[in-house]
Image (cartoon, rainbow, N blue to C red):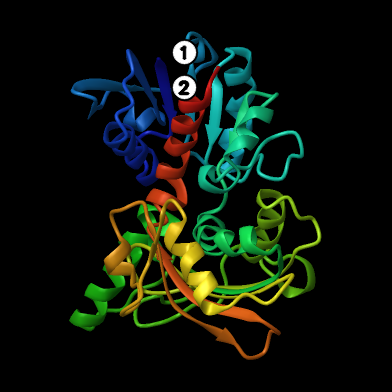
Amino acid sequence: MKIGVLGATGAVGRQMLACMEEHGIVAEELRLFASERSAGKELSCMGHTWKIEVPSAQRFQGLDVVFGAVDADLSRKWAPAIQAARALYIDNSSAFRLDPDIPLVVPQINGRDVLDAKKGIIANPNCSTIITLMAVAPLHRISPLKSIIASTYQAVSGAGNKGIEELEMEQRALQEGKEFTPSVFPVQIANNCIPWIGSEKEDGFTSEELKMRNEGRKILHDPDLKVTCTCVRVPVFRSHSISVSVQCARPVSVQEAADAIGRFPGDVLMKDGYPTPLMTSGQDQVYVGRLRPDPVLDGGIALWCCGDQIRKGAAANAVEILDYILANRA
């Protein structure tokens, strides 16, 4: 295989390279694309050193797979050239997630949807959506979900390297008694929580909150699924945490839920203690704990889950999509 990574120098792009190595994916050639300021620098992967180059339609030619780790605007800009090159484009941005002709895939949940990639594009879901659905999909298989109520507690790295740098800068400034002006987040994030991620959309919900509803419906193939979500940025460097309550078509007991989650590939059920961001950082599993009956939802289940949003919430999920394709190709 010849593989390209669009946005190779960012946090997700670098993690994609690491995940490919960990998953044993072997490429005859890697073409690493980034902005002009990174062109000519080098990154190591698969036992070789590869030069970073500026993307061009010509350089997509001959590639079998391109991983996208850029924002939605850049993804839309380069997708036609990748399609023209007949490479499979696995895109981590939001650009194509809700396109009805493009699969939106979490391999453990709806891996077979990759077979419908008629446009040569497969979309990677939002990080919080992936982590949440990994926790509740096992219950959906027991009895279809009727509703999801979720509150996310999202690490600053969800805003990229600049989010990490801003939290570090604010922490230093607070320790040294210096003034600072936030630029990445709307207000100070150090020692604080910000209940607003994304832009304002319908009925006062943000774009980040609606991703849980819209993407969840598509992944679970249920256009009527009821979802409400509140997304909160917290002063944690890595790994997102989500509090979730679900109601299924029929009541599901805590024991049934625990058994299903414990068997589900990619999930780790914690019977003692509870998941935390530090515990889950640097790995691909989603940890689920604090299972209990929800006394508000008839027959509902409440739980807490954590997952590394750069890995399972982005880069690792994209690489697992390629794993699934390679394992299931004719």
**Badge 2: how crowded within 10 Å, few (<14), some, or many (20+)?**
many
Q: Kindly identify the residue that appears in the image at 67 percent across and 82 percent down.
A: 299
Q: Kindly identify the residue that appears in the image at 40 percent across and 72 percent down.
A: 181
In this view, the residue in front, 263 or 216, is 263
Assign the N terminus to one quadrant of the image.
top left
For badge 1, the amino acid type reads: Arg
Q: Is residue 205 left or right of residue 155?
A: right
- The residue labelled by disc 2 is 55
- The residue labelled by disc 1 is 59
Q: Is residue 289 left or right of residue 208?
A: left
Q: Are marks 2 and 1 in contact (CB under 8 Å)?
A: yes
The percent position of residue 307, horizontal first and vertical second, equals 40, 61
In this view, the residue in front, 189 or 125, is 125
Q: Work out whether 287 lies above or below 220.
A: below
The percent position of residue 206, horizontal first and vertical second, equals 66, 67
Q: Secondary structure at mark 2?
A: loop
The percent position of residue 130, horizontal first and vertical second, equals 53, 55
**Badge 1: how crowded within 10 Å, few (<14), some, or many (20+)?**
some
